[in-house]
Amino acid sequence: MSSIFTADLKGIVVPCPACGQKNRLPYERLAASGTCGKCEASLPLVNAPVEIPSTAVFNAVIAASPLPVLVDFWAEWCGPCKMLAPQLERVAMQEAGLSLIVKVNTEALPGLSAQYNIQGIPALLLFRNGKLVAEQAGAQPASAIRDFIYR
Ligand SMILES: [Zn+2]
């Protein structure tokens, strides 16, 4: 699973489609699309799942995102996770600027699985305003994932 977007402590790193320059879209401004700092082309909204590189970045995203954050806990060996991945990509496309879809690799970040008591994967957790509001396990189609976000 690869995403064109990565995250750091301050925001989502968005590559410019025109010149390739990496721009940081601060979490506070996730609902808007920015312009490239180098060539001034408009940047895309975050329209794909974002891989979380560390617990610190996870906490930063959850604390600062003005958008609902849907977290997918997954692992490379997990078959249902692989079925869920393209559905999440579809939702991320539909929800660009409305919801943020992030992915937590449970083998890379086992501390987060323990913290949120993840018993089986894939597991979807929904955060609003920094708080965990809903949780759902198992692979599901994009339409069900969107229903889960807007439940
Ligand atoms: Zn550019």
Image: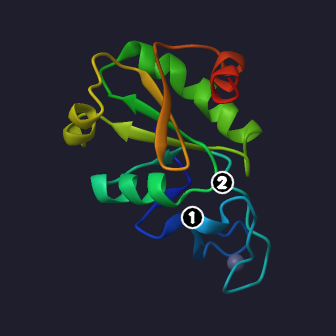
Ligand 1 occupies quarter: bottom right
Disc 1 residue lies near ligand 1 with CB under 8 A: no
Q: Residues within 10 Å of mark 1 (few under 14, many from 20)?
A: many
The answer to which of 4 and 30 lies nearer the viewer is 30
Element type at mark 2: loop
Q: Which image quadrant is residue 151 in?
A: top right
Seen at 59% across and 30% down, the residue is: 88
Q: Give percent across and percent down for residue 107.
A: 23, 35
Tell me: 112 left or right of 85.
Answer: left
Residue 2 visible within the image: no
The answer to which of 11 and 60 lies nearer the viewer is 60
Inspect the image, locate mark 1, and give the three-letter code of the amino acid beneath it.
Tyr
Query: Mark 1 or mark 2, which has the lower sequence index?
Result: 1
Tell me: 84 left or right of 117.
Answer: right
Inspect the image, locate mark 2, and give the three-letter code of the amino acid beneath it.
Val
- Label 2, on which residue? 46
Residue 33 visible within the image: yes
The answer to which of 138 and 115 lies nearer the viewer is 115
